[in-house]
Image (tube, rainbow, N blue to C red):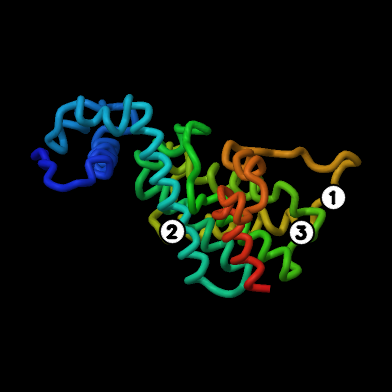
Amino acid sequence: MARARYHHGDLRGALLDAAEALVRERGPDGWSLREASARVGVSPSAAYHHFDSRGALVEALSGRVLARLGERLARDADAASADPLERLIAYGRGYVAWAVDDPAVARLAFGAGGAVGPVSPHPHDALTAELDRLLAGGGLAPSARPGAEFLFWAAVHGLATLLMDGLVRLDGPRAVEIETERLVRAVLAGLAHEAPPPRDGWPAARSAHSDRVAAAGPATPENPENSSHKSWRNRAADAE
């Protein structure tokens, strides 16, 4: 591929674009910061002003990918319906389709794990808002709400990973949509009819992002760091 020369002021963005292109060509691990620099026509020393290592570039790219995914999943839910169940089906379909359609970039984001800074909008926050919307509409019992986002995520992420790895094969995008919808309905039906929680409650599942949100606390003028989480909760409240 011909090298794309750098002609504008956003070198950081150009390096992220180059790294994303390299991920699609070679996979999450088959490229270097030096190659990303060469792709935009600058020296590695120029790139180091923005990213002090390949790992820093990967972290920034993963954050950008996750934020884009959060925006996409929110749009998918908004475009689907006012019905909370249909919105969650759209969320699940969007998540699986994104991973299957862009597997190298999805693997990069998945592989980053907790090594990603604050992301807004985060896919987790969009899912939290949709489950809160389902709860507010009576489609989910209050006792089933704690940790429901992690059960939902485990299901759709598991299907996405199985499809990316070729361990499960489906005949085309429509079949993927149908299977995802079936999975989402099964998860939500299970939550609606699950046994009472144990005496000590359900296990408290956490992720790096949920820990960050919890540490930030409610968004206030004095504590704006958690504003993205608050905005997603407001989306659910507005639908009540």
- Badge 1 crowding class, 10 Å Cα cut-off, few under 14, some 14 to 19, many 20 or more, is few
Q: Which residue is mark 3?
A: 192
> In the depicted view, which residue is nearer to us: 25 or 44?
44
Task: Please name which of the two marks, 2 or 3, marks the residue nearer to the observer.
Answer: 2
Picture coordinates of residue 8, whole percent (x, y): 15, 48
Q: Quadrant of residue 15?
A: top left
| Amino acid found under the numbered disc labelled 3 | Ala
Q: Which residue is mark 1?
A: 195
The furthest residue to the front: 222
Disc 3 secondary structure class:
helix
> In the depicted view, which residue is nearer to us: 119 or 168?
119
The numbered disc on residue 72 is 2
For the question of whether residue 96 can be seen, the reply is: yes
| Amino acid found under the numbered disc labelled 2 | Arg
Contact check, label 2 and label 3, Cβ < 8 Å: no
Quadrant that contains the C terminus: bottom right
